Each structure stands twice: as C-alpha cells, then as structure tokens.
Amino acid sequence: MKKISLLICLLFTVLGFQLNGQQAQNVYVELLGNGVVYSVNYDMRLAKKDNQLGFRSGLAILPEAGYIILQPNYLFGAKQHKFELGLGATALITTDGNTELEQVVASGALMYRFQRPDGHFLFRAGLSPTFVPVDENDTFSGLARVFWIWPGVSFGYKF
C-alpha cells in the first residue's frame, strides 16, 4: 500500500507542477499505447521551447485494474511536426478486493506528434515499446522477460 501511495503522490505532484506558466502544456487521451486500452495524460515541457525535455503523466482506470504512466520525453523537429522519444515507467495496480501494486514495467514512446506552436489541437500516433518481466514459473513459455510493442494514437489540447 505504501508503494501505491507513493506513486499516487508522485503522479499528483507531476500534475500540479508548473515552473512559471510559460511552458507548453498538453492534455490528451491516448487510445491503446502505454495505458493498454486508453489513458488520460498531462504533458508539459520543462523549458519554454517545444523542442526540449518534457514530462508526461497518465492514468487509466479499468474495471479491476489501473495504470499510472510516468515518462520523461524529448521532442525533435521543427514547427508543428515533431518526433517524441520517451522512456519511463508504467505501473499496474489491481483493485480486485485489495488495492495492490502488481508490477512496474519500463515503457517508452516512439511517436509522431502534430502540434502547432500557437495552436490548440494535438495529435500523436506511434508505438509504445514495453519491457515486461514475467514470472519464470508462469506458463508463458518459461520466458523470464518479454518485450512487446503496442500501437497508440492520441487526441488532445495544447495550452
């Protein structure tokens, strides 16, 4: 339970974190991607330029599970067409009876991002590579680790 509380506190700290209000901020819904089915995300640049280091946090709530996504990222490109490269963690939390942190996995983002420097519409599409450790005694072919790539698409708002 302490791990879940720490992750939730970290998520809300990131969501409420603003350096001085001059950085680009984005809110978007991602279908598939790091949240597996969907996720609601907040993304902000840590500098005034769009092509700089940023941070993304997301949340997905499903009937018996949830995902928390924490991912630093960097944008490359000019004007409105950008490539997003991110590497962070996705935490799986189950809620079937006891709320419990099940697993934290390394996750990434290889995304095309369309956002005008002064515009409001945000679109992302690409791949979300994930590295999942698997129990060696599991019936999943006896593999100790699995690397998989999940497609994703996002629509949102830049402010």
Image: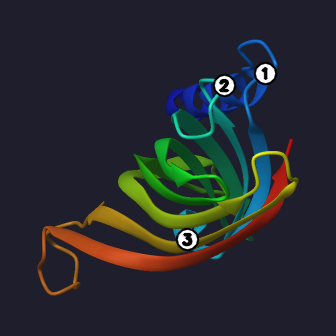
Q: Is label 3 in contact with label 2 (beta carbons under 8 Å)?
A: no
Identify which amino acid the numbered label 1 is placed on. Gln
Q: What residue is drawn where x is 56% and y is 35%?
A: 54
Relative depth, front residue between 135 and 98:
135
Q: Which mark is residue 48?
A: 2
Query: Where does residue 26 sit, x and y in percent of width and height?
Result: 77, 46
Kind of residue indicated by mark 3:
Gly
State if disc 2 and disc 1 touch (CB < 8 Å): yes
Q: Quadrant of residue 144?
A: bottom left
Image position of 53 with respect to 83: above or below: above
Q: Please tell me which of labels 1 and 2 falls first in the chain.
A: 1
Instruction: Tell which residue pokes out farthest to the front in this image.
Output: 79
Q: Quadrant of the C terminus?
A: top right
> Looking at the image, is mark 1 or mark 3 earlier in the sequence?
1
Q: Please give the residue where the numbered disc 3 appears in the rendered image.
A: 33
Other-residue count near label 1 (Cα within 10 Å), few / some / many at <14 / 14–19 / ≥20: few
Residue 50: assigned label: none
Side of 61 relative to 10 (left or right): right
Mark 3 or mark 2: whose residue is earlier in sequence: 3
Task: State the image coordinates of residue 27 (x, y, percent, origin top left).
Answer: 80, 50
Instruction: Using the image, determine if residue 111 lies above or below residue 151.
Output: above
Q: Which is more foreground, mark 3 or mark 2?
A: 2
